[in-house]
Each structure stands twice: as C-alpha cells, then as structure tokens.
Amino acid sequence: MEEKKLNNQESLELITMMINKTKRQLHIGEGNLLLWWGYVSAIVGLLVGASLLLTGGHPMCNLLWFLIWIVGGIGMFFILRKDKGRIEKEPSTYVDRLTSNLWCTIGWLFALGTLMSIGFQFYGKDTWVLMLVFAFLLAGFGASMQGFIFREKSMVAGGAFSMVAGTFVLCCVLAHVKLGVMWVIPLFVLCFVATMIIPGHVLNAKAKKQC
C-alpha cells in the first residue's frame, strides 16, 4: 500500500499537533518534576555550602552532593507514579521520545562524569569540579532545548542563564581562579531556581488554567 505524502502545510500541522499534545503532558507532570529536582538541588547546595564553611572546607563535605541523586531519584519515583493516572494514555510521539532521549543523554553524561571523577580520586587527583561545571552547563542546556521545543520562555531564559554561569565558572577553573564557597554555592542555587523552580511553577500555573 502506497504511503500518503504530506505537503508542507500538513507536515506543519502534524508537528504542531505533536508538540501541543506533548506540551499538555509536560504541563500536567513536568512542572512537579522540575520543582522537585530544583528544590532538592538548591537545598542540597545550601547544605554543602554551610558544611564547607563550618568545617573549614573539608573535602568530605562534597559527598553530600550525592543526596541530589538519592533523594531526587526516590522522590521522582513517587511523583511519576502519582501523576501517571492524570496523563492521558496516548501513543508517544516523536517529540515525546526526543525530550526523553535528551534528558537520558544528560543523565548518562552526569553518571559518566561521576565515575571518571571517582576513578581519578583513586590516583589522588581531584576532578570533582567537573561535576560543578556539568551542573551549570548540562542542566541549562537541557532546560533551554526543552524550552525551545515547547516554546516555553521561562525554561529557555533559565537555561541560558545557567549556561552563561557555567561558562563563567569554567573560565575561572581554566584561569586558576579560586572558586569561593561564598559565591559559587549561591550561584549554583540561583541557577536551579532559574532553570527548574521558576519554570516548574509557571508550568503548573498553566496546567491549572487548562483544567
């Protein structure tokens, strides 16, 4: 059976339909996920900063960063299970798979960076600053790309701010400028407020209007 070829107008309408369908699901569930990861990351960042100041910069305080993965992962499981019933059971679209693969790729990069940093630690080399730079650049990139796909300005702006901040931190590392706790941690928290907390509240507000 010969497949029907779509003209430009029909192709545009199909893409718009997929984006709108996925965007609606994003409004329903993604706002809660963004808020969860944003608040967990910000709170853990403040906890790490306070611990470093109280202990005079003891390197073991950096182990607290793993709380983001542990607490965040557990919370995400319950959020997804709770929101599953509110999302329409429709076949996933290309846009759904695109955004899912985007964040999966970013997650694997974070995991790979963590394993490499652990490996270098065994040889007495501290490369954990890589994960700090990743937090700024990768989270910002993911938020911006998803914002562009769904035409959500708050995500685009927040992601762009985080990428600019990450580039600045990277330049400081390359120029051997000391990353002071008093400014790096607040910048880290501010970036997650911009990339996840603010967009999360925006998406939830839009979801309520649609109900």
Image: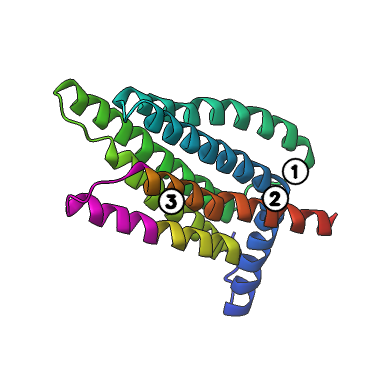
Q: What is the residue that sits farthest to the right in this orientation?
A: 211
* Residue at numbered disc 1: 87
Identify the image quadrant of residue 61.
Answer: top left
Mark 2: amino acid: Gln
State the residue in front, 18 or 55.
Answer: 55
Q: In the rendered structure, which segment of residues is drawn in magenta?
A: 164-181
Q: Could you tell me which secondary element the residue under label 2 belongs to?
A: helix
N-term mark: 2 or 3: 2
Residue visible at 32% across and 45% down? 180
Q: Quadrant of the N terminus?
A: bottom right
Q: Secondary structure at mark 3?
A: helix
Marks 1 and 3, how far apart in space? 35 Å
Residue 178 part of the magenta segment: yes
Q: Nearer the viewer, mark 1 or mark 3?
A: 3
- In the depicted view, which residue is nearer to us: 174 or 21? 174
Q: Is residue 81 above or below residue 21?
A: above
Of mark 1 and mark 2, the one earlier in the sequence is 2
Residue matched to label 2: 25
- Expressed as whole percent of the image width and height from the top left, the position of residue 133 reads 33, 47
Q: Amino acid at mark 1?
A: Ile
Q: Residues within 10 Å of mark 3 (few under 14, many from 20)?
A: some
- Quadrant of the snapshot with the C terminus: bottom right
Q: Residue at x 15, y 24 (%)?
A: 124
Amino acid carrying mark 3 in the image:
Leu
Q: Residue at x 36, y 29 (%)?
A: 62
Relative height, residue 29 to residue 144 (above, below): above
Give the x, y percent position of residue 113. 30, 36
Image mark for residue 187: 3
- State the image coordinates of residue 51 (x, y, percent, origin top left): 42, 28
User: In front: 166, or 182?
Assistant: 182
* 66 to the left or right of 120: right
User: How many C-alpha atoms fall within 10 Å of the one at disc 2: few (<14), some, or many (≥20)?
Assistant: some
